[in-house]
Amino acid sequence: MTLVVAFVRKAGNFSELVFASDSRLSGGDRNDHAQKVFQLPRSDALFSFAGNTRYAYPLMNQMVRAIEAYPQSLDRRLPLAKLRAHVLRVFQQSYSSIHGLPVNEKYPDDPDNFFLIGGFDWQTATIAAWVLSFDKKAKEFTFRPTLRKNRVCFVGDDTDAVKEAMRLTYERLRDSGKTDEEIDMEPFEILEKMIKDGKYDSIGGAPQLGKSFQHLNTVLFQVMWPAAGTGENRPHMTGRPLLPMEQSTWPLYDPSKGFYATRDSSPVLDVPIAQYEGGQSDEGLLS
């Protein structure tokens, strides 16, 4: 029930961490307005999840509250690596507290989720990301670092979809003569393709997009996408098309045109961010 991707994108002389996801929840029926890419309250990291929401949303809410309640984490004095360890402890505590199990059952059902957390780690001055998942044998949450060998990582509960996404991404990079060090928006383009193809029923809705920057800030984007039912190209926020009376100050990403700023709550669709506000460079900012 999700395909999530994290990748390091080259933006001029800087690098930025990009998170993207589809917007579908599929537990019998289909809900295509589900937020899956989140900003953490400490402002330097993003978070996303794949899998059943039975565990994902309670665990995510506890993680957010734990960050908010700990000043050293909230103001980013706690490095990302230690935040990761704190999140693992919170997840494990919440899982271990489940009770009222069926007769003769020793453990709750195994969480089938994958959690992705990442940002710019000031302690090591590097972009860092980790996949958190549940070890069914050890009955505990564990993590593995990602974006070390490859600068792109797809995560999902459908292993076939994950493998296909990675294959298609590297085919596209190879066909364009690019290396890992030159990734632009190719992984997002593959996510977009897989949503539109409809091959995997659990992957759908509008794509979601967020970035984490070296200046220890994150931003979520509106994404221009055809609205379900009408096919009208509309800005979507966290999977939901904006209503006609709604406006957003979030910057916008149009897959056919690129990144754009906003002015007076309206997308400036004819002015790329790099040329916005006096032609200031967007390097290290939004694009």
Image (spheres, rainbow, N blue to C red):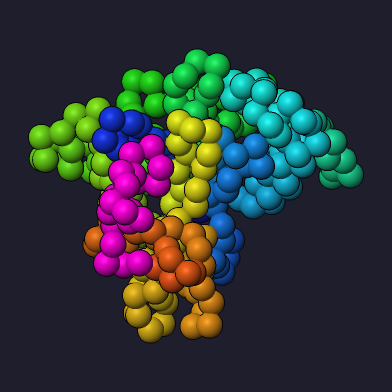
Residue pictured at 64% horizontal, 52% vertical: 53
Out of 221 and 27, give the one closest to the viewer. 221
Give percent across and percent down for residue 133.
58, 32
Residue pictured at 30% horizontal, 37% vertical: 11
Residue pictured at 73% horizontal, 46% vertical: 61
Count of number-bearing discs: 0
Q: Is residue 150 left or right of residue 264?
A: left
Q: Quadrant of residue 137?
A: top right
Q: Is residue 282 magenta?
A: yes
Give percent across and percent down for residue 71.
77, 31
- Outermost residue on the front side: it is 278
Q: Is residue 272 magenta?
A: yes
Q: Is residue 44 visible?
A: yes
Q: Is residue 25 above or below residue 181?
A: below
Residue pictured at 52% horizontal, 42% vertical: 218
Q: Quadrant of residue 45?
A: top right
Q: Is residue 25 visible?
A: no
Give percent across and percent down for residue 221.
45, 56
Q: Is residue 73 left or right of residue 101?
A: left
Give percent across and percent down for residue 59.
71, 42
Q: Is residue 100 left or right of residue 249?
A: right
What is the magenta range? 268-287
